[in-house]
Image (spheres, rainbow, N blue to C red):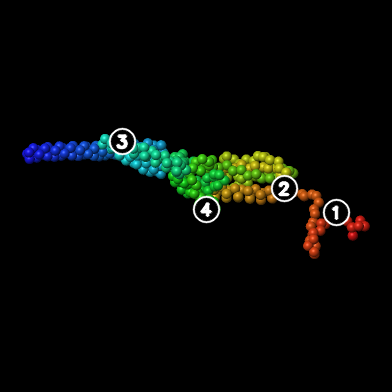
Amino acid sequence: MYGVTSTVAALALQIDTGAVVARLGGYATNVIGFVLGFVLTYLLGKLVLLPIAHRVLNRRGFDRTVLSLADSVLAALVVVLAISIGFMAAGFPRFLTAVATLGGALALAIGFAAQDLIGNFVAGVFIIKDKPFEVGDWIEWNGNSGRVEDIDLRVSRVRTFDNERVTVPNGELANNAITNPVAYDTLRQKFVFGIGYDDDIDHATDCIIEEADAVDGILSDPAPSVRVTELGDSAVGLQSRFWIDDPDRGDFVRVRSAYVQAVKERFDEEGIDMPYVHRQLTGEVEVLESVADGAVATADPTAVDGDGDGD
């Protein structure tokens, strides 16, 4: 009886040992599958996918900031893809499905919570790619103006001409019209000079053009021109149009100031009037005078004394 019991126990032990070995063998197979799937996918992405993507972005002229961001994003995607392939190779598709579902839900929640932030990042990428302005440019937007000091993926930093720094979300710049006066090599400017109705328009026009030709910084080609643009209440408006090269903000202000001053002094020498609006008020005026007891008396300027002699 004892021998039978020992034999049964030995057989049970062999069965248990075999099951454990089989289970461990299955785990080892899963681990090896995960490692092989992860390593092969990671190396393939790192050595093939990333260099190809980098070359494509380089050929399309993307900025270094975009290239750096693309490298980081693609590297993260390669790691996620390698982990996913590893789990599939290890035979855990259900776990992968659960992780994917959870990741999708988290991504959706984060997307709703940070949609403005994400929008600014996307706008920053397009600003860096499309280059509507660059660092050092003078730009105008929504009534603001200044020189661009820095373009980041989320914000751009602009120094105003009052020496203030403005940090602007890239979404605001991407979704509104931006004027870039220094995008080209030349810039046309306009200024209206008013002359009297009795003055000679042709003579005033000649004076304006001659002074434009004499100012350093105003181009002779295209040549300055003058057009009659308005007939105001007290003056005839002559609009001067002139071009400047290297349209930096400082040069633009300096050149225009020198030009306007030169035309004003020339008009004074030539006796050309620069009238301003005169307004004449008519009607009666009531004057309120305070008396000693605090009462208020009304004085009529047309009133006379009782005998009518004005005394």
Residue 245 in the image: state x and y as whole percent: 54, 44
Give the foreground label among 2 and 1: 1
Give the foreground label among 2 and 3: 3
Instruction: Identify the residue position indicated by label 4 in the image.
Output: 164
Q: CA–CA distance between discs 2 and 3?
A: 84 Å
Q: Which amino acid does the dot numbered 1 rest on?
A: Thr
Q: CA–CA distance between discs 2 and 1?
A: 30 Å
Give the foreground label among 1 and 4: 1
Instruction: Identify the residue position indicated by label 1 in the image.
Output: 302
Confirm or deny contact between disc 1 and disc 4 (CB under 8 A): no
Q: CA–CA distance between discs 4 and 2?
A: 36 Å
Residue 36 in the image: state x and y as whole percent: 24, 38
Q: Which amino acid does the dot numbered 2 rest on?
A: Val
Q: Which comes before the other along the chain, label 4 or label 2? A: 4
Which quadrant of the figure has residue 113? top left
Q: CA–CA distance between discs 1 and 4?
A: 58 Å
Confirm or deny contact between disc 2 and disc 3 (CB under 8 A): no
Q: CA–CA distance between discs 1 and 3?
A: 103 Å
Which residue is at a point 68% across and 45% down the rendered structure image?
194
Q: Which amino acid does the dot numbered 3 rest on?
A: Arg
Give the camera-side residue of 228 and 300. 300
**The N terminus - image quarter:** top left
Instruction: Identify the residue position indicated by label 3 in the image.
Output: 94
Callout 1 crowding tier (Cα within 10 Å): few <14, some 14–19, many ≥20: few
Instruction: Identify the residue position indicated by label 2 in the image.
Output: 277
